[in-house]
């Protein structure tokens, strides 16, 4: 499943509502074909650096060629070049922000991008991002929150993997963390927590993703006393099957989360979600109702939650069922499309 799917599906749905859409992207992909088949115009030439004169010229040429109401910019390179391209033109400029970090009023580079006076609207992926923007932008509040929802139908037909192929006994609890490891993902806290849970539970942890098997991680796994229970399958094309097979999916991040796609995927696949209480995560689940939250950077709290969820299968089932209901309601793709439509209409008003 493409990491761009939630965004791409939004514009396919908006096209059905009658929007005329042009997308500037990197190159051929499955969605380029679908865009074209739906009547969406596709251009190649997405900016590759903060000041990309060729990309800026392409965007401006397109803005001059026909009347556009809104220029929607989704990442820092697109924002920097799109703002330059829109100079002196009547088009509304809207920018997207999915991370509640690194937008600071005292950083002059932000005034070339998201805090630029030319920006008419800031689309935030969650309330945490909006609060961060509001605390760093002076004057009129131009932020709006629209969660990037998913459709449960996207996950139909995904069968859990046989966990014995990972070296996990059939009767052993399977925990999984999926990430391309970075210092913000909090994996050391998770590995420390593995050393604190009751070894009689025979819990196995799967660390799926790139750079999970670092020397630091392996040392912590050894220190846990049961390194053979920690598995590093690397990057997997069938990661959804691994998540579907797990009893608990854990996101131990310490900062910088958005409305985390990896968490939403677990919710859609019916896997109980344990995550840190960070901006972005707060809208995903209600603690004790549709998921379980612990403070970030707290291995002991993480270990206690892991033990509780491992031992209480009824609790896991209830949390997972309620999480799916959230994806069918406030976090659904249909709700996102409705809110995106309202966002664009309000911007034009």
Image (spheres, rainbow, N blue to C red):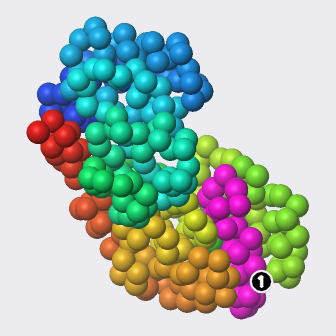
The x, y position of residue 276, in whole percent, is 54, 74
Query: In this orientation, does residue 251 appear?
Result: yes
Q: In what quadrant of the picture does the C terminus appear? A: top left
Q: Nearer the viewer, residue 216 or 245?
A: 216
The residue shown at (30%, 66%) is 326
Please state if 271 lies on the left or on the right of 190 as rendered. Answer: left
The residue shown at (61%, 87%) is 301
The residue shown at (67%, 52%) is 180
Give the SS element for disc 1: loop
Whether residue 266 is situated above or below residue 70 in the rendered picture: below
Residue at label 1? 195
Q: Nearer the viewer, residue 66 or 260?
A: 66
The x, y position of residue 18, in whole percent, is 14, 28
The x, y position of residue 153, in whole percent, is 33, 49
**For the view shown, which residue lies furthest in the left direction?**
349
Query: In this orientation, does residue 31 appear?
Result: no
Please state if 71 lies on the left or on the right of 201 as rendered. Answer: left
Q: Nearer the viewer, residue 35 or 226?
A: 35
* Residue 321 quadrant: bottom left
* Residue 310 quadrant: bottom right
> 10 Å neighbourhood of mark 1: few (<14), some, or many (≥20)?
many
Highlighted magenta segment, given as a residue range: 177-206
The residue shown at (41%, 39%) is 116
The x, y position of residue 54, in whole percent, is 52, 13
Whether residue 239 is situated above or below residue 245 in the rendered picture: above
Magenta-drawn stretch contains 188: yes
Magenta-drawn stretch contains 53: no
Please state if 136 lies on the left or on the right of 233 as rendered. Answer: left
């Amino acid at each position: 499943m493409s990491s761009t799917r939630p965004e791409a599906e939004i514009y396919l749905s908006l096209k059905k509502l009658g929007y005329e859409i042009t997308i500037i992207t990197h190159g051929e992909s499955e969605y380029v074909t679908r865009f074209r088949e739906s009547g969406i115009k596709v251009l190649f030439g997405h900016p590759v650096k903060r000041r990309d004169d060729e990309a800026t010229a392409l965007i401006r040429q397109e803005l001059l060629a026909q009347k556009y109401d809104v220029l929607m910019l989704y990442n820092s390179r697109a924002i920097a070049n799109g703002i330059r391209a829109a100079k002196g033109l009547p088009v509304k400029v809207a920018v997207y922000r999915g991370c509640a970090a690194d937008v600071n009023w005292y950083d002059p580079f932000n005034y070339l991008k998201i805090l630029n006076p030319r920006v008419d609207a800031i689309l935030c992926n969650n309330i945490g991002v909006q609060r961060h923007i509001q605390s760093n932008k002076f004057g009129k509040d131009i932020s709006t929150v629209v969660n990037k929802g998913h459709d449960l139908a996207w996950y139909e037909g995904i069968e859990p993997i046989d966990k014995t192929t990972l070296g996990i006994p059939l009767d052993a609890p399977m925990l999984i963390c999926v990430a391309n490891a970075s210092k913000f993902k909090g994996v050391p806290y998770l590995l420390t927590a593995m050393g604190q849970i009751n070894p009689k539970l025979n819990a196995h942890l799967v660390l799926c993703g790139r750079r999970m098997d670092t020397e630091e991680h392996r040392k912590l796994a050894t220190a846990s006393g049961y390194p053979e229970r920690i598995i590093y399958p690397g990057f997997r094309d069938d990661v959804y099957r691994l998540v579907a097979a797990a009893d608990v999916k854990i996101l131990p991040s310490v900062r910088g989360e958005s409305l985390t796609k990896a968490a939403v995927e677990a919710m859609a696949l019916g896997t109980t979600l344990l995550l840190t209480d960070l901006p972005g995560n707060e809208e995903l689940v209600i603690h004790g109702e549709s998921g379980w939250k612990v403070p970030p950077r707290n291995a002991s709290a993480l270990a206690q939650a892991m033990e509780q969820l491992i031992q209480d299968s009824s609790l896991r089932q209830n949390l997972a069922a309620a999480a799916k209901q959230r994806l069918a309601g406030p976090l659904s793709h249909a709700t996102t499309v409705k809110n995106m439509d309202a966002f664009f209409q309000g911007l034009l008003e």
